[in-house]
Every structure is written in C-alpha cells, then in structure tokens.
Image (cartoon, rainbow, N blue to C red):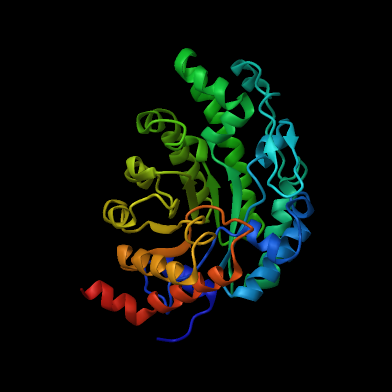
Amino acid sequence: MKTMTSLERCMAVLNGEIPDFLPVVPQSFMFAVETAGMKISDVNRCGKKMLEAHIISQDKYGYDGCVIDFDDATIAEAVGAKVIFREDEPATVDEERPVLKDLHDVYDMPLPDPMTSGRMNEWLEATSRLKEAIGDHVFIMGRADQGPFSIACLLRGTTQFMMDLMTEDEKLINDVLDYCRRISTIFAKAQKDAGAHATSIGDAFAGPNLISPDMYRRFALEPEKILTQEVQEYGIPFSIHICGNTNGIIQDMGTTGAKILEVDWMLDMKEARRIVPKEITLMGNIDPSFPLVLGNTTQVDEAVRNLIEATKGRRHIISSGCAMGRNTPPENFKAFISAARKYGAYEEILRLQDE
C-alpha cells in the first residue's frame, strides 16, 4: 500500500476505498487556538489568525484535516443578531434580544452577503488561505456555521421558538425554517467557492438534547434534506453534525443524503454503521471529555481501538465526538493520533473486515 497524503486519505474514505491509514480530522479549533498560544477572542473576528492557529496545530501534530470553525453565532449575526464576545470562549448569540420579535418578521429579513455581512468573510478568508497554504495535501473542511433549525432558535430565542412550535401555524414555522435554510445554503456554497474540500453545518438545537426524535422528523429533517441536496449539487461534499445522543435519529440523519455525518460520542457506532447507508461516511466519535481531557494515554488508546473495531474502518474518519476542549493534554492528543495510525492501518482494517 503506497503512502498517501492526508488529503488522499480523506478522499479515499469518501470514495469508499480503504486508505493507508484511517484519516484523523478532529474538531479541534479551540485546541488549535491554545496550541498557537492565542485566545478565542484573538481569532473569532480574524480569519488570518484562525488560519495561523490551524497551520501551527496541524504542523505540530500531523492530523489529516482541519475543520474551520469559530462559534455558532456568525450566520445569526450576519442577519442582525446581537452577539456576546468573550475573551476565551466562543461567541454566543444574545437570545434575550431576538431578531425575530414576531415570526412574521421573517418575511422582511435580508439574505446575507458572505463577503460583507458580519464576520462571514473572516470564516471564508480562513478557509481560502488555509487551502492555499496546505490544501494541496491536507483536507480542509469549511464550516458553514449552523443548520436551519438551530438558526431559527438563535434568531427567535430558543425558549420562545419551542413555544412557537406548539402554538403557531405550521406553515409560518416552515417559512421561518425555509428562510434559515436559504441563508445556510448561501454560506455553505461560499465555503466551496473559498476552496474547501467539504463543508458542514452543526444543527445541535435539532438534536435530542432539546427536541424529541418525532419533532426532529417533523420540523428539522426536511430543511436538512433540501440544504444537503442544494449544497452537494453545487459540487461539494456536505456534512451534518448534531450534538448529543443521536441514536434515536441517526437513521433519519442518514436519509438527508449528506456524504458525511459527524457524530457525537454517545452514538453507538457499531449500530450506526449497520443502519446508516454504506455510502455515507461516519466522522467521530471519541468523547472529548473522557478520555481526551480527563483520561490518560492508555485510556485514549483503548477508546480509539474500540471505536475502529466498532466500524471495522468502513467509511470512517476518526474524530472527536464534538469540539475538543482547549485544555486537552497534548500527550492525550498525540496518543489519539498515534492510536488511529496503529489500529487504523490498512492491514488492520483488512483483518477486521475479514473477521
């Protein structure tokens, strides 16, 4: 088996091939910032500094891909939301001052321009500069911020939107979600134009930490399907990440058609690999708290081994289950990557798949 570049490894998995090693693409933007000796406030309004943080971290640890992420407030900010910036934590939307004071306000909401609205251009600058710097051999995943349901929560206020789901006309709810889907599509397509090899959204508010599987199917799934189709028809693989225990909706997530599903640490990966269509790549799902922060190198090694045995390396990108903490011990991160190389080697994957 010839030695592949990091980019070749990732593309091999997306194409259903067995690479020389399963690729490692961690959710590491906060850890990258820490590695570069910066603070979140240094980078979340500066694409150039985010670029520098990713380059320093990827060069030091040698993982296979960078996920360009800042926070979950950028799309909402671009259409008028007030944002709370913090020195060493990701920015958040001020939900006490909602943009949508009434759901009918959605009909007067603007569509953002990725080059001029809020901080969207900073994300795109980080993506394009990173592609120029290392994208010939490292996988670059642009993050198009939040998915439709999550954007609706941020624009309306989460508590109020939950009440709206119970009391307001469903067509009006769907019109709000359609607007949010359109602005998410704009940002995702702009990530392709900036040079990303793939792009993604987080839709945490659509997950089981907030709504039931039935509500996910009723309100969140269809906008995700349309978004996925629009973005992938534009010519770029699309990924969906939903935080929390998604065992109850992972099969539904598989119907979106997304090329990649980024999954949290609570998901049963063996069962997920069985029920999610085989052409979809699973990305995840080592617990970013234990063992990555609170465990030791032996426990990290064991977790990675168990993870790879669960999927047998079938269309699998190794990653953290959610965003890695900036306080992740460097020795644990090194053990994470080392274990992926050891248990995810081509010969080991062939052995697992022959069992």
Residue 1 appears left or right of 113: left
Q: Residue at x 31, y 58 (%)?
A: 278
Count of number-bearing discs: 0
Residue farthest along the left direction in this orientation: 355
Residue farthest along the bottom direction in this orientation: 2
Q: Is residue 221 above or below residue 125?
A: above
Q: Is residue 92 above or below residue 344?
A: above
Residue 183 appears left or right of 344: right
Locate the C terminus and report the quarter of the image it occupies.
bottom left
Viewer-proximal residue among 244 and 328: 328
Would residue 64 be visible to someone looking at this image? no
Q: Is residue 242 above or below residue 279?
A: above
Locate the N terminus and report the quarter of the image it occupies.
bottom left
* Residue 195 % position (x, y): 64, 61
Q: Residue at x 41, y 76 (%)?
A: 19
Would residue 198 be visible to someone looking at this image? yes
* Residue 184 % position (x, y): 59, 40
* Residue 261 % position (x, y): 43, 52
Q: Is residue 76 above or below residue 295?
A: above
Residue 194 appears left or right of 182: right
Q: Residue at x 51, y 18 (%)?
A: 163
* Residue 234 % position (x, y): 54, 51
Q: Residue at x 47, y 32 (%)?
A: 210
Viewer-proximal residue among 303 and 184: 303
Viewer-proximal residue among 236 and 340: 340
